[in-house]
Image (cartoon, helix red, strand yellow):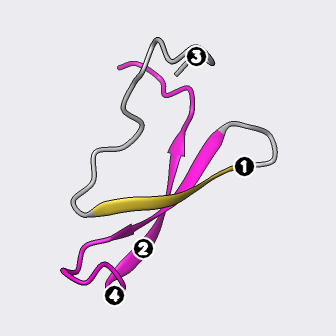
Amino acid sequence: MNADGSNVRLLANTEGRATEPRWSPDGSLVYFTNCKSVDWGRDCEIFAAPTHPTKP
């Protein structure tokens, strides 16, 4: 999204709760954890989503 909150867009569509977002050093990716378990503390994975995805 833009700094003013406009142009919001989905980076990743995952099942579970995505938390702890972090930018890559060059700004091309956002890394985040995604936990699927009911207690949100187990069955977690780390995902990377491009900040400027290519269009098909």
Q: Is residue 16 left or right of residue 49?
A: left
Magenta stretch encompasses residue 51: yes
- Residue hosting label 2: 45
Give the mark, 3 or 1, whose residue is nearer the N terminus. 3
Instruction: Check residue 42 in the rendering and tell me which mark sits there, or answer none.
Output: 4
Residue at left offset 52%, top offset 22%: 1
Give the mark, 2 or 1, whose residue is nearer the N terminus. 1
Q: Is residue 32 left or right of residue 18?
A: right
Q: Quadrant of residue 44?
A: bottom left
- Residue hosting label 1: 24
Quadrant in which the C terminus is drawn: top left
Name the amino acid, label 3.
Asn
Name the amino acid, label 2.
Glu
Give the mark, 2 or 3, whose residue is nearer the N terminus. 3
Name the amino acid, label 4.
Arg
> How would you rate the neighbour count of disc 2 (Cα within 10 Å): few for under 14, some for 14-19, many for 20 or more?
few
Instruction: Name the element at disc 3.
Output: loop
Up-down relation of residue 47 to residue 43 (above or below):
above
> How would you rate the neighbour count of disc 3 (Cα within 10 Å): few for under 14, some for 14-19, many for 20 or more?
few
Q: Nearer the viewer, mark 2 or mark 4?
A: 4
> How would you rate the neighbour count of disc 4 (Cα within 10 Å): few for under 14, some for 14-19, many for 20 or more?
few
- Residue hosting label 3: 2
Instruction: Check residue 1 in the rendering and tell me which mark sits there, or answer none.
Output: none
> How would you rate the neighbour count of disc 1 (Cα within 10 Å): few for under 14, some for 14-19, many for 20 or more?
few
Residue at left offset 28%, top offset 45%: 13
Query: What stretch of residues is rendered in magenta?
Result: 29-56
Instruction: Name the element at disc 1.
Output: loop
How far is disc 4 from disc 1 in space, using C-alphas? 24 Å
